[in-house]
Image (cartoon, rainbow, N blue to C red):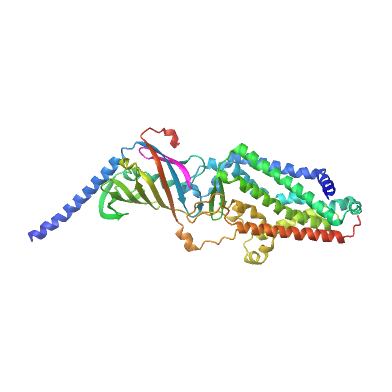
C-alpha cells in the first residue's frame, strides 16, 4: 500500500496542474494582502458599518495578520474546492484517457487498494495545499500586518477574540477545512471512476459545489427545511465555528471557549459520513468497472 | 389676611433660596473637580452592548482640561462609545451656561443626595437637561442623567474611594442608547450554529448599552501632552 501511495503521489506531483493550484493561491493571497495593506482601513470601515458613528474604533488595529488571514479564508475556502477537483477529478479518469488504467488494474494489488491509494495521495495534495494557504495567509500576514485581537463579524453583531486566544482556533479551522476539502476530493474521485476523461469529473464537481452552495445560502423555507440539512456544503462553513467565541450573559467573552461546539462536531460527523459513503461508492464502482481503456 | 400674604410672599423667597443653595452646591462640586487639571488612570473596562461580545479590556484613561478625554486599550482593540467622553463630569458641569434648579432629595445606596437639575440657557445646545444626584456632605456626584437632542439619554453612576478629595471616582457605570448593528449574510457568510434568532421584543430591550470602568489608580496633575489625544 505504501508503494502504491508513493507511486500515486509521484503521478500527482509530476503534473503541472498540481503546481498551478499553488501558484494561483499565492497570487490570490498576495493580491488580497496588497489590497488590505493599501486600503485595509477602508475595508474595515465598511465592515463596521454604522458602528463607527457611535463608537470610537481604532481601524488601524483592526487590520492585523489574524484579520487578514480570516478574510483570506472567507474568500478562498469557497474556491479551493475547484483546485482540489482539478487534481482529484483526474486521478482515475486521467489514467483512463491516457490508457494506463488497464495496466494499473493488471498489477497484483486489489482495486480497493488502488482507489484508496489514489484517495490518500489526493489527501496529501489537499494537506499540502492547505498548509501552503496557512503559511502564506497566516504566517506572511502576521509578518506584514502584525499581531492583534481578531474581530469577527456575524450578521447579529461583532465578537472580539484576544490575540493570545486566536492561533489555536486557526489550527482547528485548517483541520476542519481539510476534512471539508476531502469531501470534495471524494466527490471528484467518485465522478472520476465513472468517466473516461478528466474534464467531465472536474466540471461536474465544480457544478455540484456551486449548485449546493447556492441552495445552502438561499433563504427559501422549502430548501432550508428539506434540502439544506442533507447538503455537504451546509457543513463546510463549520471552520468558522471555531471563531465564534462563548460569552457570559452580559456579553463578556470567555477565553478559550467555542460558542457552539456541538454544531461543529455535528458538521465534522456529517462530512466524515459523506467521505465514507463517497469513497465506498468509488471503491464499489471501480471494483465492478469494466476497464477497457 | 396679613398671615396669608406673608406665606404667599415666602413661597417664592424660599424657592429662590433653595435654587441658590443648589447653585452653591453645584459650584462647590465644580470647584472640587476643578482641582484636577489632567490625569492619567489605569482601569478595567467591561462593555455590555447587545451586538458586541468583547473581553474585559485593560485601558488607560487620559484627561486634560477643559474637555479632552481619551480611553485607550494599550494592547488590543476596544470599542468605546463616543458618548463615553461624558464620564468626565467637566463635560456636564462646564458645558455652557445653565440654570440650576433644586429638585429635592433622594437616596442612592443609603446615602441621602440632593437632586439638582441643570437647564442649559442656550436653546440650541445639544444637552436638553442634566440631572445630578449630589452627595452634599462629600461634594461628589453619585449619579447623573443627561438628555441630549441627538444622542438620546445617558446615565452615569459613580462610586468613590481613594481619590474622593479630587472628585474622581473609583468606578463608573455609563449607560447609553445604542443603535442596532446588522450585516447582510452575504457579507458575513455565517456558519449555521444552531443559535435561536432574537425576537423583536428582545431586540428592543437590547437598545441600551453599558460600559463599566473600574479605575485602579490615578496620576493627577503631572501633565499630559496634547499629542496623546491626537
**Does residue B27 lie above or below B11 as drawn?**
above
- Residue furthest to the left: B2
Whether residue B192 is visible to the viewer of this picture, yes or no, is no
Front residue (pair A250, A81): A250
Q: In the shown orientation, is residue B36 left or right of residue B57? A: left
How would you classify the magenta stretch by its main secondary structure?
strand
Q: Residue B187, position in %: x, y?
A: 60, 52
Q: Residue A106, position in %: x, y?
A: 92, 53
Look at the image and tell me in which quarter the C terminus of chain A lies: bottom right
**Does residue A107 lie above or below B226 as drawn?**
below
Front residue (pair A199, B75): B75
Q: In the shown orientation, is residue A90 left or right of residue B220? A: right
Identified at 64% across, 55% down, the residue is A238
Q: Residue B94, position in %: x, y?
A: 32, 42
Question: What residue range appears in magenta?
Answer: B56-70
How many labels, in total?
Answer: 0
- Residue furthest to the front: A2
Identified at 46% across, 57% down, the residue is B206
Q: Residue A255, position in %: x, y?
A: 54, 49
The quadrant holding residue A147 is top right
Whether residue B163 is visible to the viewer of this picture, yes or no, is yes
Q: In the shown orientation, is residue B108 left or right of residue B62? A: left
Front residue (pair A18, A112): A112
Magenta-colored stretch includes residue B68: yes
Front residue (pair A48, A242): A242
Amino acid at each position: 500500500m505504501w508503494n502504491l501511495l508513493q507511486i500515486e503521489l509521484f503521478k500527482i506531483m509530476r503534473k503541472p496542474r498540481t503546481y498551478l493550484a499553488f501558484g494561483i493561491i499565492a497570487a490570490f493571497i498576495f493580491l488580497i494582502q496588497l489590497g488590505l495593506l493599501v486600503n485595509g482601513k477602508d475595508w474595515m470601515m465598511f465592515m463596521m458599518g454604522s458602528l463607527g458613528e457611535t463608537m470610537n474604533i481604532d481601524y488601524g488595529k483592526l487590520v492585523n495578520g489574524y484579520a487578514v488571514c480570516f478574510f483570506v479564508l472567507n474568500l478562498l475556502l469557497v474556491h479551493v474546492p475547484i483546485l482540489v477537483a482539478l487534481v482529484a477529478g483526474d486521478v482515475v479518469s486521467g489514467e483512463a484517457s491516457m490508457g494506463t488504467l488497464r495496466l494499473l488494474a493488471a498489477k497484483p494489488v486489489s482495486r480497493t487498494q488502488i482507489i484508496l491509494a489514489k484517495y490518500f495521495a489526493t489527501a496529501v495534495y489537499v494537506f499540502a495545499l492547505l498548509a501552503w494557504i496557512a503559511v502564506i495567509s497566516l504566517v506572511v500576514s502576521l509578518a506584514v500586518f502584525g499581531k492583534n485581537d481578531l474581530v469577527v463579524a456575524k450578521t447579529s453583531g461583532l465578537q472580539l477574540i484576544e490575540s493570545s486566544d486566536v492561533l489555536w482556533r486557526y489550527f482547528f479551522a485548517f483541520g476542519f477545512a481539510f476534512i471539508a476539502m476531502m469531501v470534495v476530493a471524494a466527490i471528484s474521485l467518485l465522478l472520476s471512476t465513472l468517466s473516461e476523461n478528466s474534464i467531465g469529473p472536474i466540471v461536474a464537481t465544480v457544478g455540484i459545489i456551486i449548485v449546493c452552495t447556492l441552495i445552502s445560502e438561499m433563504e427559501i423555507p422549502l430548501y432550508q427545511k428539506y434540502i439544506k440539512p442533507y447538503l455537504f456544503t451546509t457543513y463546510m462553513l463549520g471552520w468558522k465555528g471555531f471563531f465564534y467565541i462563548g460569552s457570559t450573559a452580559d456579553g463578556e467573552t470567555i477565553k478559550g471557549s467555542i460558542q457552539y461546539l456541538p454544531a461543529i462536531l455535528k458538521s465534522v460527523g456529517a462530512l466524515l459520513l459523506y467521505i465514507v459513503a463517497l469513497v465506498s461508492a468509488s471503491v464499489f464502482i471501480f471494483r465492478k468497472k469494466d476497464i477497457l481503456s | 389676611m396679613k398671615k396669608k400674604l406673608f406665606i404667599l410672599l415666602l413661597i417664592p423667597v424660599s424657592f429662590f433660596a433653595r435654587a441658590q443653595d443648589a447653585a452653591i452646591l453645584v459650584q462647590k462640586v465644580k470647584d472640587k473637580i476643578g482641582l484636577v487639571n489632567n490625569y492619567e488612570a489605569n482601569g478595567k473596562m467591561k462593555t455590555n452592548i447587545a451586538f458586541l461580545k468583547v473581553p474585559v479590556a485593560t485601558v488607560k484613561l487620559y484627561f486634560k482640561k477643559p474637555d479632552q478625554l481619551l480611553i485607550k486599550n494599550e494592547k488590543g482593540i476596544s470599542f468605546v462609545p463616543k458618548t463615553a467622553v461624558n464620564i468626565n463630569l467637566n463635560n456636564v458641569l462646564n458645558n455652557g451656561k445653565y440654570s440650576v434648579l433644586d429638585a429635592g432629595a433622594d437616596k442612592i445606596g443609603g446615602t441621602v443626595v440632593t437632586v439638582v437639575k441643570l437647564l442649559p440657557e442656550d436653546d440650541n445646545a445639544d444637552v436638553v437637561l442634566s440631572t445630578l444626584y449630589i452627595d452634599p456632605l462629600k461634594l461628589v456626584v453619585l449619579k447623573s442623567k443627561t438628555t441630549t437632542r441627538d444622542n438620546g439619554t445617558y446615565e452615569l453612576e459613580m462610586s468613590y474611594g481613594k481619590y474622593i478629595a479630587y472628585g474622581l471616582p473609583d468606578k463608573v457605570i455609563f449607560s447609553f442608547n445604542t443603535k442596532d448593528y446588522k450585516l447582510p449574510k452575504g457579507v458575513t457568510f455565517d456558519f449555521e450554529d444552531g443559535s435561536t434568532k432574537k425576537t423583536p421584543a428582545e431586540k428592543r430591550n437590547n437598545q441600551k448599552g453599558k460600559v463599566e470602568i473600574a479605575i485602579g489608580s490615578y496620576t493627577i496633575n503631572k501633565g499630559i501632552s496634547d499629542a496623546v489625544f491626537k
